[in-house]
Image (cartoon, rainbow, N blue to C red):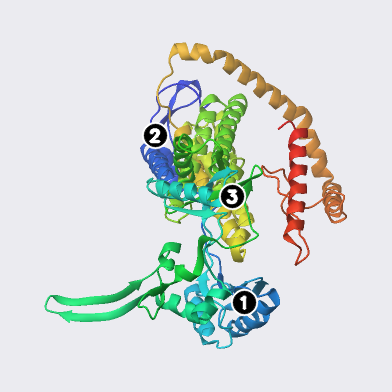
Amino acid sequence: MNIDDEGPVGPVDVLAEGGATVPEERSERGPLAWMAANPVAANLLMAVVLLGGMLSAFSLKQEVFPEFSIDMVSVTVPYPGASPREVEQGIVLVIEEAVRAIDGVRRVNSVASEGMASVSIQLLLGADQDRVVSDVTNEVNRITTIPLDAEEPTISAATIRQPVISLIFAGDQDLRTLHGLAEQAREELLELPEVTQLDVSGVPPLEIAIEVRREDLEAYGLTLEQIAAQIRMASIDLPGGGVETFSGEVLVRVVDRRLTAEGFADVVIRGTAQRHELRLGDIATIVDGYEDTDQTIEFGGLPAVQLTVYRVGDQTPTEVATAVKDYTERLRARVPANITLSTWSDDSEALEDRINLLFKNAVMGLALVLIVLTLFLSRRVAGWVALGIPISFLGAFLFMGPLDVSINMMTLFALIITLGLVVDDAIIVSENIYRAGQQGMGRLEAAVKGAREMAMPVTFSVLTTMVAFAPLLFVPGVMGKIFRLIPIVVMGVLFFSLVESFYVLPAHLSHKLGRGWPAGARLMAPIDRLQAGVTRGLERFIETRYRPLLGTFLEQRYTTVAVAVAILLITIGAVVGGVIPFAFFPQIEGDVVTAAARLPFGAPVDRTLAVRAELQAALDLAIEESGG
């Protein structure tokens, strides 16, 4: 009997060969048999997984890379004008000595550069980051040998932000013009509901330079220390306590901060004998500008300022990038013609490409499953098996939310991996049910018996795959926080695939939804004839080719095992000997070409600029040769 025979069949009475109605065996017990005999429950389970998974998929957080905390604390101490050796001796070594013995510290790495000390403190796995930050702060504050000219240390827990897209202003203009446009764009972008956080880069720190001639100092009998003291006194922001009044307490604060060159020019240095006030602007040249640094950003060979926009909270990279691109188009009409406005490094495109790849592979996999199973089994079996793909994937989405797993490059990679695994168990179970039906069993009996026979091997097969991915859950450090998402998603998909194979699929294969229409039957007749021909050809191949070859292998089992072991050893030797190259991460072409040059410490700026010009010329030549 073929389980595709038409006709309404109840959960108890089935049609046997010859059309006789025989009672189904009533001795079947257990959840698998109950679900197979109650299609309403199976359909309800399927609907819950499908609807719940779809709702969860739309509510999951989207990001390019998963968010995670770095088990690291950073300490930075600016030391203006100091050489790297002075920074190392005066700051780096004493901080290293102070923090090395703190509980939870694994390793201390430091960098001493010109005018800056940076200390990175790596924590032990599982250490309380907030407590370590507090302990580091206390230890650093106890240090009394840090040079007086050094600025206050900045101590913070290391974090990773999620950049999405950059907006670049470039042109043959002075830095102040580019910076002004970038700051204006920054304020306008922050007014958009899709944008919450962004940074301006390529701009040196603001600086107000005050220069006093020696002749003026001698003429007024002043020293630089006296002028510096007056400037400090005239630019303060201090709390002054509180004053009790009849209406309540009034907080007092002394605010006399100066933030512009004009404000500092009005600082009174001292009064004169003629009762005139000598102001700083009378004896000094005050310039409101930027620090003199050797670091610059260029875009297309022109000076540039960059705005980097970040994703925060539940914002998706796509909505952030779309909002920035739309704003860029509106802003381009207001920017001067000699300034180029461009978007750069749009990471949302990588996420969209990975999502499109997942859908493309899912559609191809679904089509292949339908074609192959239709040819070798039946149309109905193919349809219900193919339904296992969306059920398994949406089931995984269902639990990703409670586990705080987002849709990102790693989870999408895991979903793509499972595309080749997700229907294996359903194919095995459905084929065994189909075979049982071909042997003359009733549909319900065939569904229960076929599923039960495959329950143990299929379950252990899925568990073996889960165990193969499980070690990624225990990778330590930052890489572990990234890779752990792969086994979580893979195990979720395989679990729901197993549930669908044993509690949904048998119910569907044991019951008809109704009689087919004659027109539909006529349309499907060519496919049925093709399926029958393929089945006969497969059976002929099994009987004439596969079965004799299998019998030979079984008779010569020791020889077969020896040959298999020899092939395995040859393969291992080829990898170890370098015949087959091995790399943990394959070398693949990227979308960005990076050129870097390292010059000896102390190399003049002119030499650095010359090297940069050579790199730029080589890049221009490469672009020209590639037709770009």
* Residue that badge 2 annotates: 11
Neighbourhood count class around disc 2 (C-alpha, 10 Å): few under 14, some 14–19, many 20 upward: some
Residue positioned 62% across, 80% down in the render: 91
Residue positioned 66% across, 70% down in the render: 114
Where does residue 463 sit, x and y in percent of width and height? 58, 53
**Residues under numbered marks 2 and 3 in contact, where contact means CB atoms less than 8 Å apart:** no
Whether residue 79 is situated above or below residue 481 in the rendered picture? below
Q: Nearer the viewer, mark 2 or mark 1?
A: 1
| Spatial CA span between label 2 and label 1 | 65 Å
Q: Quadrant of residue 119?
A: bottom right
**Residues under numbered marks 2 and 1 in contact, where contact means CB atoms less than 8 Å apart:** no
Residue positioned 41% across, 38% down in the render: 37
Camera-side residue: 474 or 268?
268
Left or right of 536? Residue 445 is left
Whether residue 191 is situated above or below residue 293 in the rendered picture? above
* Residue that badge 1 annotates: 106
Left or right of 164? Residue 120 is right
Camera-side residue: 204 or 556?
204
| Spatial CA span between label 2 and label 3 | 30 Å
Camera-side residue: 460 or 98?
98
Which element type, helix, strand or loop, lies under badge 1? strand
